[in-house]
Amino acid sequence: MRSHPAPAKFALITLAALFAAALASAITIRGASGNGQDSNAPNWLLLGRSKAIPLAANGKKAVATREIVCLNQDDENALSNPTVSLSGSCDSGVYMYLFQFQSTSANVGVAIGKLSGFDPTNVNNFGVMICDSPTNTIEMCTNDPTGTHIPSITTVAAKTSVTFTVPNAFPTYPAGTAQQGQGLTFFVITRQSSPLPISLPSVGIR
């Protein structure tokens, strides 16, 4: 006699498929103006842009630059009554990591890993950062003020990682200010249970 899978098993498979589909979604676009302004940069710019680092994998090449922002504008060192032991952190433990890329390769996958306190089910926690306002000229961002030249990037997010896949030729953008940089800029938001130690993400390409 042939056995048949129980309805509950079908339900579990369906839920798993829906969950996976929910995590593979189109890109979220966020404006730098939502993170702070030049006038209060000490409150939100935790770590300024790094030097560009070369990345290579599977015959593809790219260069990446990093930056860290306190999303809640609570850089401990800028608070009126800071906790000395938390110096160098975002007081709330909420961090926004920025990664700016330039590449001449096609079909590049950008992999951000080792994330702590990351919620992959909230699509507002990862996406592309654009330069959308003259009031914030010192944060790294993609110089596409309206977001109309962002390609159809897809994302796949998991508990500790998110991958952005850029189809076809990697896009190019004009340079912004020296601080805004030049290139396609991704953001990832994490919420650590404690401000320190900071769990720095890994970055690579595929």
Image (tube, helix red, strand yellow):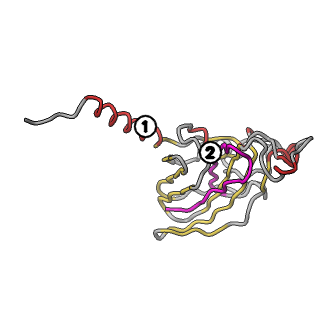
Badge 1 amino acid = Phe
Q: Is residue 124 visible?
A: yes
Give how far across and how far down residue 47 sits, in percent.
77, 55
Q: Earlier in the sequence, mark 1 or mark 2?
A: 1
Question: Does 111 sit left or right of 50 as displayed?
Answer: left
Kind of element beneath mark 1: helix
Seen from the viewer's position, the closer of residues 40 and 16 is 16
Using a 10 Å C-alpha cutoff, classify the residue at mark 2 as few (fewer than 14 neighbours), some (14 to 19) or many (20 or more): some
Q: Is residue 67 above or below residue 189?
A: below
User: Dot 2 corresponds to which residue?
Assistant: 117
Q: Is residue 135 visible?
A: no
Q: Residue at x 51, y 65 (%)?
A: 105
Using a 10 Å C-alpha cutoff, classify the residue at mark 1 as few (fewer than 14 neighbours), some (14 to 19) or many (20 or more): few
- Is 187 in the magenta? yes
Where on the picture, by quarter, is residue 172? bottom right
Give how far across and how far down residue 43 sits, in percent.
84, 44
> Could you tell me how far apart the alpha carbons at marks 1 and 2 are, in whole angstroms?
19 Å
Q: Nearer the viewer, mark 1 or mark 2?
A: 2
Give how far across and how far down residue 29 sits, in percent.
61, 41
Q: Residue at x 50, y 41 (%)?
A: 26
Question: Does 202 sit left or right of 2 as displayed?
Answer: right
Question: Does 88 sit left or right of 188 as displayed?
Answer: right
Badge 2 amino acid = Gly
Q: Disc number at residue 64? A: none
Q: Which residues are magenta?
A: 183-206
User: Dot 1 corresponds to which residue?
Assistant: 19
Q: Residue at x 7, y 35 (%)?
A: 1
Q: Is residue 91 above or below residue 53?
A: above
